[in-house]
Image: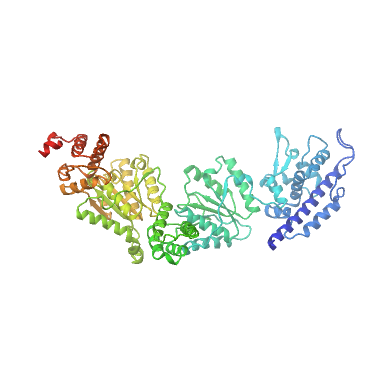
Amino acid sequence: MSEAMATHDDWLEANGRFMAAAVAWVRALLRRRVPVETPRGFDRRPREGAGLNADDPVRAEAAMKAAAQAMTPPPALLILAERLGLSPFEQRALLLCAAAELDTSVAGLCAQVQGDPTRPYPTFALALSLFDDATWDVLTPERPLRRWRLVEIDRPGGTALTVSPLRADERIVNFLKGVTYLDERLGALLEQLPAAEGDLPPSQQSAAQRAIRLWSSVDPGQPPPPIQLLGPDAASKRAVAAHIAEALGLRLLRLDPALLPTTPTDLDAFARLWRRETRLLPVALYLDADGADPAQIVSVDRLIARIEGPVLLAARQLWPNTDDASVAVDVDKPTPAEQADLWREALGPDAADLPDALAAQFNLAAGAIVNLARRERLQASDAEADGSESDRAGLRERLWDGARGVSRPRLDTLARRLAPRATWDDIVLPPAETALLQGVADQVAQRAKVYREWGFAERMNRGLGISVLFAGPSGSGKTMAAEVLASHLRLDLFRIDLSTVVSKYIGETEANLRRVFDAAEDGGAILFFDEADALFGKRTEVKDSHDRYANIEIDYLLQRMEAFGGLAILATNMKSAMDATFLRRLRFVLDFPFPGVPERSAIWRRVFPSATPTEGLDFDRLARLNVTGGHIAVIALNAAFQAAHAGGPVTMPMVLHAARIEFRKLGRPVNEADFHWREAAA
């Protein structure tokens, strides 16, 4: 057993002796006060009970004081008195209530002393008559017994306060016994955060040190000011908070504002219990207010105004309605260079240039990097234990996909993740557009070198993201081009659902867009805004409030697109409807022309999968059909279903029949002679 553990056990044993002596003293005082003549049903003589100095209060009190003087630290009762400001009489009144919980004979003695068998409980009146130096201010709500809810008062039917039953709070009774734990009424709402792991990156270490210095410099007895941890990344803020708590010897407890009581009375009771806990335990409150709604913001404000002790408020932006005592500390994810160092340290010397590549593409918190690397090491250890060689060649793919999974944005209500299947071999574009699309992929892959290694990021504070406009008629390959980029870059592709983003309520559209862009900032996703002209349309002359707020939305988008650090693709069928200022700020604009005969011929040759049976298809003949690649794909699919139903391969009559259906769907004139293979062949 360690010396510290032995010392604590010794203190617990000594505190137990002190409490036994203290309860014996209370019992002796009560027995001394039992009248010789009692109402019917009571013993006529004081009961003799076992225990230390049962009938001599003087000797019992001396034994209690001797036990206290022999203890270092002092007994829990004296610690409680010092931390909560209890007067000597209040300590005795609390001890009377605690004795009733610890000794079953005390309740009967209380009834005998009060001359009523229906009152087997302590009261303020009993305490005032039992102990010396009694003071009436013990009854006031501002004194510690009632202020800190050390005793519970039961006042049925408007019973007078002095004769109402008193009961020591369970948490306080256990504290007096030396048992320390978080009040269960708080424990149901609070979550203990994990202890700090490893060292913080230098940029986060400076933020943690600032908070540590601030709280360390607070004068004893003064409440430390609340500290706001500001930034979009919850994991980084928790890591910084954990190191702050560890450095100051505090236990960090997280509170979700959604769990806060909503009524003022219940909220005040919660705040009172928390203030009491901060005086009994070394605890700090971590208020996780990142996603607080307006109603929760009000509850958080009320709570902060009512509590004391160390409070860390985690928020995305500076919290409103805070006083001047609050201090804001910005907490960001590790810098790209720090992330590369974390990857390098976690993966070891065999990682080569993988750390730089991962840090260039993904913006991860330190904990996520460590966990991904730990998972890879465990897999390598399992492979070695099985006698097989670890797949070093697949290391990059595994870590890359792992980082994609960690950084995948939560956009379930605002976007749909597309599984990219198209590759460079599938898309057919003119050479100029193909080269431009390749240039987009190259910029995404090389942006870390240009921005950070070559210093462009130091000279530019906006426009570091890559924004692209795909413009062209429906079916010309815009979505396929987005899939090609996602496949080539091994990134997730999210199509933004404009029906859930655009809102008629003022400010709601901007809030939704902020959620979209913020969620995708970690670098593992490509944002694809289809039919972007509905969202990024031209600004208009302001004629009413609707025009003004529509223009504000476009202005916000211009700023947010420039600040976005990833790849955002906008697609539109009506380039002329796009705002001119917005177009100038885009990095690339790719025009997807209506495919000509050579392009259509190439598309027809690629549209049928290799596993699809075909027979006698004349691709040059099919290329004369004036349709886009998207319509060609629909025609090919419908023809395949015809072939599957017929139980044979896909033939020209089937394709032409499917083409006739597609033309009619599009409302185009149909020359039947063009859609009969035999007539055309003749």
- On the image, which quarter does residue 165 sit in? top right
| Rendered location of residue 114, percent (x, y) | 81, 38
- Identify whether 363 is placed above or below 118: below
The residue located at (74%, 50%) in the rendering is 91
* Numbered marks: total: 0
| Rendered location of residue 229, percent (x, y) | 49, 55
The answer to whether residue 538 is seen in the rendering is no
Nearest the camera: 348 or 444?
348
The residue located at (31%, 44%) in the rendering is 550
Left or right of 370 on screen, residue 523: left
The quarter of the rendered structure image containing the N terminus is: bottom right
* Residue sitting at the far left: 682
Nearest the camera: 110 or 182?
182
Left or right of 513 on screen, residue 371: right
Left or right of 503 on screen, residue 268: right
The answer to whether residue 111 is seen in the rendering is yes
| Rendered location of residue 200, percent (x, y) | 50, 62
The residue located at (81%, 45%) in the rendering is 130
The quarter of the rendered structure image containing the C terminus is: top left
